[in-house]
């Protein structure tokens, strides 16, 4: 009788604590829930870069993809661009693809930006669909996608040169 | 364990005050009192005696009504605190929240922010308070409903004398029990819809026992309600997002997995006017100025056809045209699109003309799409204009250079290069709204502003709420519980022959006045005395 009561009470309390625990956990992770989860396949997309070349993410299986979302008005984006370009030069023949996506500005503005910063990696403009699929909110945000198309890391915020290098090493096949 | 065996032979759980079966008083303290405490039928609630393990201690903590009431009071006070200043989600999105609170509300705002009250309703301690109320609700209810059910289920017809004489309504009729008077009493009881049990000539008449379960039904409703609230945190159950769509624009609707698109044909803001809306509004309109009559977005819903990936031109099938108004959302597949916000007259296209300053002669117009300006605009006769730079939301940045704050053309500015036969190298001119700078010295030509085209932007909320029916169900059960407990009373009448006299005792869980009036009717014509109020006036209070 006494034993039974203890077991019953423990069970009920555990169920209640589990429910409360889950709610608290869900509440505190809701802000940093990314639409794109680490370990899952990155959503596919097709965009045409400023040179007119078409890029489909799923065509780059076998290569690591360094995917960066940015805008010209975003200061941290602007600061990290030269680092990405330097490392792009270094890694482009080592199986690391760099794709950067502007979040829907006009071609004129983006082209001027590319010219000003002398960017050599492919730049694409997305009118919104890819951003929605990736759940982009604050900029810049960088996704690292491995040779199997899986997301291995997402990073919100400015990168410095050594981080960019580390990231590219991480996805180098 | 030390169960208590009553003299009637019934075995009660430890901690029982009144025997579940015959009502005999089992606790010595209780015997001193004039009336027995009938709450929960004197059953072994809040088994404080099992206090050995940590589990029992936690259980007993939450099982206390006192603790439950304090949790509610603290939660109420906390909820009130959150309304003193606006929560973070309602402050304008300029600068950081920390600065905003200090700027607007001084030291108090800073304190409010530092204490985390700007996000009070999603803070861990607030959620724990709510959760504790939930736990308290479950445990309090379980700890009371089970013994109460046992006691009501096991009650015997023949109750102990000590129990009967300590009831609030009690009477002894000296007339010996005759079958006539008892029969009359039973008939009267039946007329009042009492159910009657008999045992050795003793009577237990009872009605509306189900009303005792009202509070517990009510608590079940509350718990379902809380579960519904909890489910909002489960991904996919609750979606609340804002999407802005310009007139003429087609956008993918967020959270629909790229399946649905929305096209905004037109956003309409209508105001009341005196001529068309009748004289009666005239005075009110004079007093208040502009009064909005209608916010409306005329939209077209599309569904994607085929397997395109984001970025590819999707093939869209029209689903329907709809006019979204406040409280008239566009509904599809569990989603609802509500009209929540708007922006009127956003700049969309600007027209300039190339003009010779001295003569005022014009050499042709160019129209610039502010969302997609061209690099170069050709005019006739060897005149042309290049757009060297474009700043849709112009400002001078901290280095004093022209820059843009966003991609929205709130304050467009251009650097034009005007190529004319006179100046084949081109003249540079910086043109912003109401401002022209000629960085290379005086120009012979200028870009004169001619006209602007604007468009309205509709702000819509994308809402999906799969928890709503659970919350409604919880609310419904809650109300059923309230009605059940409030509009019916559990009434009982005991009749027992003791030493040739008839003892009667009455009990109700509420509305004693109602029971007394009913007993007056029931005892009329039976020759028996109506049980009398035993509670003194001092004790009646409360």
Image (cartoon, coloured by chain):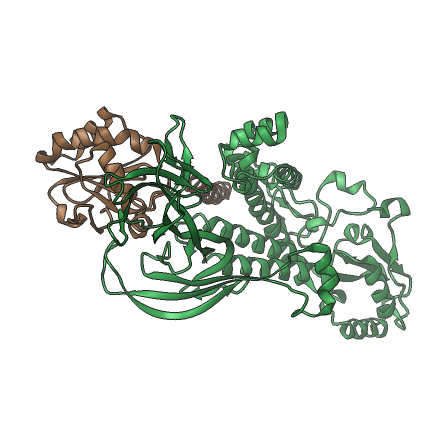
Q: Identify the residue shown where x is 17% and y is 29%.
A: A87
Q: Would you say B154 lies left or right of B227 here?
A: right
Of residues B153 and B296, the one nearer the viewer is: B296
Q: Identify the residue shown where x is 85% and y is 48%.
A: B540
> Which color has been applied to chain B in this rendered view?
green
Res B193 → quadrant:
bottom right
Residue A43 % position (x, y): 24, 49
Question: Is residue B478 something one can see in this rendering?
Answer: yes
Q: Would you say A166 lies left or right of B445 here?
A: left
Res A102 → quadrant:
top left
Compared with residue B30, is residue B382 higher up or lower down, i.e. above or below? below
Residue B229 % position (x, y): 51, 50
Of residues A12 and A62, the one nearer the viewer is: A62
Of residues B434 and B97, the one nearer the viewer is: B434
Residue A171 % position (x, y): 16, 35
Question: Is residue A153 something one can see in this rendering?
Answer: no
Q: Which chain is in brown here?
A: A
Of residues B431 and B354, the one nearer the viewer is: B354
Q: Would you say A48 lies left or right of B350 here?
A: left
Q: Identify the residue shown where x is 58% and y is 58%.
A: B475
Q: Would you say B518 lies left or right of B235 here?
A: right
Number of marks in the rendered image: 0
Which residue in the rendered view is the most extreme toward the front? B359
Residue B536 % position (x, y): 89, 47
Compared with residue B268, is residue B43 higher up or lower down, i.e. above or below? above
Q: Identify the residue shown where x is 30% and y is 32%.
A: A78
Which residue in the rendered view is the most extreme toward the left? A93
């Amino acid at each position: 009788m006494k034993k039974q009561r203890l077991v019953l009470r423990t069970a009920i309390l555990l169920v209640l604590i589990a429910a409360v625990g889950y709610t608290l956990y869900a509440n505190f992770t809701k802000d940093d829930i990314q639409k794109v989860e680490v370990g899952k396949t990155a959503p596919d997309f097709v965009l045409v870069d400023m040179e007119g070349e078409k890029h489909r993410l799923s065509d780059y299986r076998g290569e690591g993809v360094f995917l960066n979302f940015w805008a010209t008005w975003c200061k941290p984006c602007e600061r990290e661009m030269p680092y990405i370009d330097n490392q792009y030069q270094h890694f482009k023949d080592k199986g690391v693809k760099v794709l950067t996506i502007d979040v829907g500005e006009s071609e004129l503005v983006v082209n001027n930006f590319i010219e000003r910063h002398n960017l050599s990696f492919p730049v694409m403009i997305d009118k919104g669909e890819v951003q929605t699929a990736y759940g982009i909110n604050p900029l810049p945000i960088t996704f690292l996608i491995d040779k199997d198309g899986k997301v291995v890391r997402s990073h919100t915020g400015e990168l410095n040169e050594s981080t960019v290098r580390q990231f590219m090493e991480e996805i180098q096949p | 364990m030390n169960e208590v065996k009553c003299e009637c032979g019934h075995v009660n759980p430890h901690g029982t005050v009144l025997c579940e079966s015959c009502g005999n008083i089992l606790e010595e303290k209780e015997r001193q009192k004039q009336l027995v405490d009938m709450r929960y039928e004197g059953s072994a609630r809040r088994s404080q005696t099992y206090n050995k393990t940590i589990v029992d201690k936690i259980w007993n903590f939450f099982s206390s009504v006192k603790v439950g009431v304090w949790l509610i009071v603290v939660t109420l006070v906390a909820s009130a605190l959150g309304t003193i200043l606006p929560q973070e989600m309602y402050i304008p999105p300029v600068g950081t929240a920390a600065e905003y609170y200090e700027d607007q509300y001084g030291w108090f705002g800073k304190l409010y922010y530092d204490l985390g009250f700007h996000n009070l309703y999603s803070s861990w301690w607030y959620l724990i308070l709510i959760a504790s109320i939930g736990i308290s609700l479950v445990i309090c209810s379980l700890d009371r409903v089970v013994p109460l059910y046992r006691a009501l289920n096991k009650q015997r017809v023949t109750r102990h004398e000590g129990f009967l004489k300590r009831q609030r309504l009690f009477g002894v009729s000296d007339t010996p029990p005759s079958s006539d008077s008892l029969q009359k009493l039973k008939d009267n009881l039946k007329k009042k819809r009492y159910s009657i049990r008999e045992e050795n000539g003793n009577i237990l008449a009872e009605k509306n026992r189900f009303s005792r379960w009202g509070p517990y039904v009510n608590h079940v409703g509350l718990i379902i309600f809380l579960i519904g609230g909890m489910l909002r945190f489960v991904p996919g159950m609750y979606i609340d997002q804002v999407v802005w769509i310009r007139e003429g624009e087609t956008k993918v609707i967020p959270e629909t997995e790229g399946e649905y698109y929305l096209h905004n044909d037109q956003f309409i803001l209508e105001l009341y006017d005196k001529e068309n809306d009748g004289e009666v509004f005239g005075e009110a309109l004079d007093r208040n100025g502009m009064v909005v009559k209608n916010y409306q977005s005329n939209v077209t819903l599309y569904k994607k056809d085929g397997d395109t990936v984001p970025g590819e031109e999707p093939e869209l099938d029209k689903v329907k045209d709809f006019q979204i108004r406040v409280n008239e959302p566009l509904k599809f597949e569990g989603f609802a699109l509500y009209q929540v916000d708007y922006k009127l007259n956003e700049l969309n296209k600007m027209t300039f003309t190339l003009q010779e300053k001295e003569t005022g002669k014009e050499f042709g117009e160019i129209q610039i799409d502010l969302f997609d300006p061209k690099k170069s605009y050709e005019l006739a006769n060897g005149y042309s204009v290049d757009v060297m730079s474009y700043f849709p939301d112009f400002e001078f940045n901290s280095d004093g250079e022209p820059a843009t704050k966003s991609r929205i053309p709130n304050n467009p500015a251009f650097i034009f290069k005007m190529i004319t036969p006179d100046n084949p190298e081109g003249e540079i001119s910086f043109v912003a709204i109401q401002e022209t700078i000629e960085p290379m010295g005086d120009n012979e030509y200028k870009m004169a502003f001619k006209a602007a085209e604007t468009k309205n932007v509709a702000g819509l909320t994308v809402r999906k709420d799969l928890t709503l029916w659970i919350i409604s169900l919880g609310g419904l059960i809650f109300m059923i519980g309230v009605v059940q407990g409030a509009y019916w009373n559990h009434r009982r009448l005991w009749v027992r022959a003791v030493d040739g006299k008839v003892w009667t005792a009455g009990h109700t869980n509420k509305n004693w006045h109602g029971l007394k009036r009913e007993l007056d009717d029931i005892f009329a014509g039976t020759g028996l005395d109506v049980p009398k109020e035993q509670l003194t006036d001092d004790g009646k209070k409360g």
